[in-house]
Image: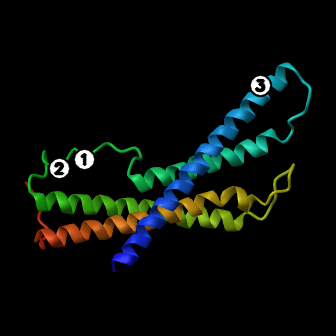
Amino acid sequence: MEKALNFLRHMDSVILSLLKAISIVCFILLTILVTANVVVRFVPVVSLHWFDEIVEMIYAYLVFYGAAALWINKEHFSVGDWMSGRIIKSAGGCRVYRLALELLKLAFAGIFLYYSFRLAMMAIDVTNVFAIPKRVLYSCMPISALIMVVYSLCSIVMQVFELVRSGDHHLTSAT
Protein backbone atom coordinates (compact mmCIF):
# COMPACT_ATOMS: atom_id res chain seq x y z
CA MET A 1 0.00 0.00 0.00
CA GLU A 2 2.84 2.38 0.88
CA LYS A 3 4.49 1.69 -2.47
CA ALA A 4 1.28 2.62 -4.31
CA LEU A 5 0.95 5.85 -2.31
CA ASN A 6 4.55 6.77 -3.04
CA PHE A 7 3.94 6.15 -6.74
CA LEU A 8 0.84 8.38 -6.67
CA ARG A 9 2.76 11.12 -4.85
CA HIS A 10 5.51 10.88 -7.45
CA MET A 11 2.99 11.05 -10.32
CA ASP A 12 1.34 14.01 -8.62
CA SER A 13 4.62 15.92 -8.48
CA VAL A 14 5.45 14.97 -12.10
CA ILE A 15 2.07 16.19 -13.36
CA LEU A 16 2.33 19.42 -11.39
CA SER A 17 5.91 20.03 -12.55
CA LEU A 18 4.92 19.38 -16.16
CA LEU A 19 1.99 21.79 -15.97
CA LYS A 20 4.15 24.46 -14.37
CA ALA A 21 6.87 23.97 -17.00
CA ILE A 22 4.36 24.21 -19.84
CA SER A 23 2.93 27.41 -18.34
CA ILE A 24 6.37 28.98 -17.86
CA VAL A 25 7.52 28.08 -21.38
CA CYS A 26 4.28 29.42 -22.85
CA PHE A 27 4.66 32.66 -20.91
CA ILE A 28 8.25 33.10 -22.11
CA LEU A 29 7.30 32.33 -25.72
CA LEU A 30 4.35 34.69 -25.53
CA THR A 31 6.57 37.46 -24.18
CA ILE A 32 9.15 36.91 -26.93
CA LEU A 33 6.53 36.80 -29.70
CA VAL A 34 4.67 39.89 -28.54
CA THR A 35 7.94 41.79 -28.19
CA ALA A 36 9.01 40.65 -31.65
CA ASN A 37 5.69 41.73 -33.09
CA VAL A 38 6.05 45.20 -31.57
CA VAL A 39 9.61 45.52 -32.94
CA VAL A 40 8.58 44.33 -36.40
CA ARG A 41 5.81 46.92 -36.53
CA PHE A 42 8.38 49.70 -36.12
CA VAL A 43 11.20 48.03 -38.09
CA PRO A 44 9.47 45.94 -40.78
CA VAL A 45 12.31 43.56 -41.64
CA VAL A 46 10.20 40.42 -41.70
CA SER A 47 6.53 39.51 -41.93
CA LEU A 48 4.90 37.79 -38.98
CA HIS A 49 1.75 36.70 -40.82
CA TRP A 50 1.64 33.59 -38.65
CA PHE A 51 1.77 35.57 -35.40
CA ASP A 52 -1.94 35.44 -34.49
CA GLU A 53 -2.19 31.71 -35.01
CA ILE A 54 0.74 30.81 -32.77
CA VAL A 55 -0.10 33.37 -30.09
CA GLU A 56 -3.65 32.03 -29.88
CA MET A 57 -2.38 28.49 -29.32
CA ILE A 58 0.29 29.49 -26.80
CA TYR A 59 -2.14 31.67 -24.88
CA ALA A 60 -4.73 28.88 -24.70
CA TYR A 61 -2.12 26.42 -23.44
CA LEU A 62 -0.86 28.94 -20.88
CA VAL A 63 -4.33 29.66 -19.54
CA PHE A 64 -5.73 26.15 -19.37
CA TYR A 65 -2.63 24.26 -18.23
CA GLY A 66 -1.91 27.05 -15.76
CA ALA A 67 -5.47 26.77 -14.45
CA ALA A 68 -5.02 23.02 -14.00
CA ALA A 69 -1.81 23.61 -12.03
CA LEU A 70 -3.62 26.10 -9.82
CA TRP A 71 -6.48 23.63 -9.38
CA ILE A 72 -4.09 20.93 -8.19
CA ASN A 73 -2.58 23.25 -5.56
CA LYS A 74 -5.97 24.74 -4.68
CA GLU A 75 -4.60 28.18 -5.51
CA HIS A 76 -7.34 29.17 -7.95
CA PHE A 77 -9.45 32.22 -7.28
CA SER A 78 -11.98 31.81 -4.52
CA VAL A 79 -13.84 33.96 -2.06
CA GLY A 80 -12.35 31.98 0.80
CA ASP A 81 -13.93 29.88 3.47
CA TRP A 82 -15.98 32.60 5.10
CA MET A 83 -18.69 30.28 6.40
CA SER A 84 -16.65 27.86 8.52
CA GLY A 85 -16.52 29.06 12.08
CA ARG A 86 -18.70 32.11 11.46
CA ILE A 87 -21.98 30.81 10.09
CA ILE A 88 -21.36 27.07 10.44
CA LYS A 89 -20.19 26.55 14.01
CA SER A 90 -19.86 22.77 14.33
CA ALA A 91 -16.79 20.92 13.05
CA GLY A 92 -19.01 18.33 11.38
CA GLY A 93 -21.02 21.04 9.64
CA CYS A 94 -17.80 22.60 8.36
CA ARG A 95 -16.68 19.25 6.97
CA VAL A 96 -20.02 18.74 5.23
CA TYR A 97 -19.82 22.29 3.86
CA ARG A 98 -16.32 21.66 2.46
CA LEU A 99 -17.53 18.40 0.92
CA ALA A 100 -20.41 20.26 -0.73
CA LEU A 101 -17.94 22.78 -2.16
CA GLU A 102 -15.79 19.97 -3.53
CA LEU A 103 -18.87 18.45 -5.17
CA LEU A 104 -19.69 21.81 -6.78
CA LYS A 105 -16.11 22.10 -8.05
CA LEU A 106 -16.40 18.58 -9.48
CA ALA A 107 -19.65 19.53 -11.21
CA PHE A 108 -17.98 22.57 -12.78
CA ALA A 109 -14.97 20.54 -13.90
CA GLY A 110 -17.23 17.79 -15.26
CA ILE A 111 -19.28 20.25 -17.31
CA PHE A 112 -16.09 21.88 -18.55
CA LEU A 113 -14.70 18.45 -19.51
CA TYR A 114 -17.85 17.48 -21.39
CA TYR A 115 -18.18 20.65 -23.44
CA SER A 116 -14.47 21.12 -24.10
CA PHE A 117 -14.20 17.51 -25.30
CA ARG A 118 -17.19 18.06 -27.59
CA LEU A 119 -15.60 21.25 -28.94
CA ALA A 120 -12.30 19.48 -29.60
CA MET A 121 -13.99 16.54 -31.32
CA MET A 122 -16.17 18.75 -33.51
CA ALA A 123 -13.22 20.86 -34.67
CA ILE A 124 -12.46 19.29 -38.04
CA ASP A 125 -10.84 22.27 -39.76
CA VAL A 126 -7.22 23.39 -39.71
CA THR A 127 -5.53 26.71 -39.04
CA ASN A 128 -4.89 28.99 -42.02
CA VAL A 129 -1.12 29.40 -42.01
CA PHE A 130 0.41 26.24 -40.56
CA ALA A 131 -2.53 23.91 -41.26
CA ILE A 132 -2.48 22.71 -37.66
CA PRO A 133 -5.65 20.79 -36.82
CA LYS A 134 -7.84 22.92 -34.54
CA ARG A 135 -8.12 19.86 -32.33
CA VAL A 136 -4.50 20.45 -31.37
CA LEU A 137 -5.35 24.00 -30.41
CA TYR A 138 -8.40 22.92 -28.41
CA SER A 139 -6.80 19.83 -26.85
CA CYS A 140 -5.54 21.81 -23.85
CA MET A 141 -9.12 22.32 -22.66
CA PRO A 142 -10.28 18.70 -22.24
CA ILE A 143 -6.85 17.65 -20.96
CA SER A 144 -6.82 20.34 -18.27
CA ALA A 145 -10.49 19.63 -17.48
CA LEU A 146 -9.70 15.93 -17.03
CA ILE A 147 -6.89 16.84 -14.64
CA MET A 148 -9.34 19.04 -12.72
CA VAL A 149 -11.91 16.24 -12.54
CA VAL A 150 -9.35 13.73 -11.27
CA TYR A 151 -8.05 16.08 -8.60
CA SER A 152 -11.59 17.06 -7.60
CA LEU A 153 -12.43 13.39 -7.16
CA CYS A 154 -9.32 12.97 -5.00
CA SER A 155 -10.35 15.96 -2.89
CA ILE A 156 -13.84 14.53 -2.47
CA VAL A 157 -12.44 11.17 -1.35
CA MET A 158 -10.18 12.95 1.16
CA GLN A 159 -13.11 15.03 2.46
CA VAL A 160 -15.26 11.90 2.87
CA PHE A 161 -12.43 10.11 4.72
CA GLU A 162 -12.04 13.13 6.98
CA LEU A 163 -15.78 13.21 7.62
CA VAL A 164 -15.92 9.49 8.40
CA ARG A 165 -12.72 9.55 10.49
CA SER A 166 -14.05 12.39 12.62
CA GLY A 167 -17.08 10.34 13.59
CA ASP A 168 -19.62 12.77 12.13
CA HIS A 169 -21.77 10.29 10.23
CA HIS A 170 -24.88 12.42 10.22
CA LEU A 171 -25.35 15.45 8.04
CA THR A 172 -26.23 18.33 10.32
CA SER A 173 -26.56 21.98 9.59
CA ALA A 174 -25.48 24.49 12.18
CA THR A 175 -27.96 27.21 12.98
Q: Is residue 82 above or below residue 146?
A: above
Callout 1 secondary element: loop
Name the front one of labels 2 and 3: 3
The answer to which image quadrant residue 162 occupies is bottom left
Picture quarter with the C terminus: bottom left
Query: Which of marks 1 and 3 precedes in the sequence?
Result: 3
Residue closest to the far front: 3
Assess disc 3: are there few (<14), some (14-19) or many (≥20) residues with their C-alpha within 10 Å of its C-alpha: few
Q: CA distance from mark 2 to mark 3?
A: 49 Å
Q: Which mark is residue 84?
A: 2
Residue type pointed to by label 3: Val
Q: Which mark is residue 108?
A: none
Residue type pointed to by label 2: Ser
Question: Is disc 2 in contact with disc 3, using a CB cutoff of under 8 Å?
Answer: no
Q: How is the image coloured?
A: rainbow
Which residue is located at x 34 percent, y 64 percent? Answer: 155
Badge 1 is on which residue? 81
Badge 3 is on which residue? 38
- Residue 117, given in percent of the width and then of the height, sits at 61, 66
